Image (cartoon, rainbow, N blue to C red):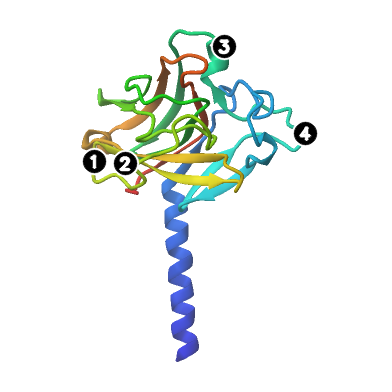
Amino acid sequence: MKGCKLSILLLSICLGAGWANAAQKKISISSLANNTWCGEDLIGCSTFPVGTKHYNGVAYTMLGNKKGTENTAWFAVDAAGHGGGTVSITIPVNVAKVKTVYTLMNTEWGSTQSGLISITFTGSGGATWTYDLTGGTNVRDYNNGNYTNTCICQLPGGVGQSATINAWGNGAGQRLDEQVYELPAAFATQTLESITITDSGNENVQRAILAAVTVSTTGP
């Protein structure tokens, strides 16, 4: 009987994990990535993760290879030609009934000025939601140095909210943070067509780094 109960418990755990994985979809940004970690000369660049990784129960595709020749992320600073001005990236998603979006995103420098980074979600039936990220609150510098090093590390409190928690760290001060977005209720009956990230910063001011995106049809 004990063996039977153990088998049932293990089966339940496996099925639960399977359901969670089925609800998640890793979104490729390979065609939009524009540089490598070391090409951008980031501190600790050789330690950044590559391949399928799981952080806080969420699966991500981390671009790159051991030779370091494949672009690994979208760097706003490169999109802007290392100058000022607004740049953006639009990521095709096309997944129905998305409830939660997860991004691995940090900044290359950091600023507490609001409105420098925004993320917009667009649905097939007209639903749209734009969320502004603020340095030191829900996005921070990838490096624990002289720029924004704090965040309100918690899960969102409900639909139409977002929060940030840490995903990866190399123990030497470099990190990747996970933004968790609970989409407004309207998206539950539509297809999430795309996600647009807009950066209005400048070199040595802020500038976003997007490493990965995953969407889910369940809550966080």
Tag 2: amino acid: Lys
Tell me what residue is drawn at x 63 percent, y 39 percent: 48
Q: Describe residue 179's horizontal placement relative to residue 184 as left or right.
A: right
Mark 4 vs mark 2: in front = 4
Circle 2/circle 3 CB separation < 8 Å? no
Label located before the other in sequence (4 or 2): 4
Q: Position of residue 176 (x, y in %)?
A: 52, 39
Q: Amino acid at mark 1?
A: Val
Q: Is residue 203 above or below residue 161?
A: above
Q: Are marks 1 and 2 in contact (CB under 8 Å)?
A: yes
* Cα distance in 3D space between marks 2 and 3: 35 Å
Image quadrant containing the N terminus: bottom left
Amino acid at pointer 3: His
**Mark 3 lies on residue:** 82
Mark 4 lies on residue: 67
The residue carrying mark 1 is 159
Q: Of label 3 and label 1, which has the lower sequence position?
A: 3
Q: Position of residue 202 (x, y in %)?
A: 47, 14
